[in-house]
Image (cartoon, rainbow, N blue to C red):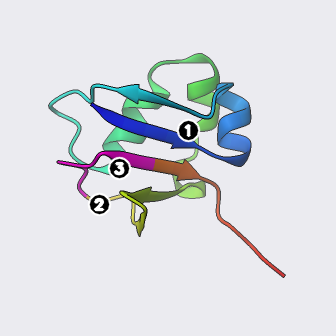
Amino acid sequence: MVQLLYFAWVRERIGRDGEAVDVPAGVVDVAGLVDWLAARGGGYAEAFAEPARLRAAVDQTFAPLDAPIAGASEIALFPPVTGG
């Protein structure tokens, strides 16, 4: 089981800030996780419609979408962060 955390407009579109899920065996990286989540439909489809607009952290370390997720306990998905 992995804890998923959602932030900013990702959270708003899904309607929750996180959840614990059992990731299917065929899902091996962040991109596959995003595709699997989008296939759930509804707010998930809306939140994950454009994966290139997302950033991820695997176990609190920034990770590219092709980062493996095997053994991860926490994955955060969020839009790009800007500051100023």
- The residue that mark 1 highlights is 48
Q: From the image, which quarter does the N terminus lie in?
A: top left
Q: Is residue 41 above or below residue 79?
A: above
- Quick check: marks 2 and 1 in contact, CB under 8 Å? no
Question: Callout 3, which amino acid?
Answer: Val
Question: Callout 1, which amino acid?
Answer: Phe
Image point 15% across, 30% down: which residue?
Answer: 25
Q: Is residue 1 above or below residue 51?
A: above
Q: Secondary structure at mark 2?
A: loop
Q: Position of residue 63 (x, y in %)?
A: 39, 65
In the image, which residues are magenta? 68-75
Q: Is residue 6 above or below residue 45?
A: below
Decide if residue 43 is on the left or right side of residue 71: right
- The residue that mark 3 highlights is 30
User: Does label 2 or label 3 sit earlier along the sequence?
Assistant: 3
Q: Is residue 81 above or below residue 38?
A: below
Instruction: Classify 10 Å Cα crowding around label 3: few (below 14), some (14-19), many (20 and above).
Output: many
- The residue that mark 2 highlights is 67
Name the foreground residue: 28 vs 52.
Answer: 28
- Quick check: marks 3 and 1 in contact, CB under 8 Å? no
- Quick check: marks 2 and 3 in contact, CB under 8 Å? yes
Q: Position of residue 23 (x, y in %)?
A: 27, 30
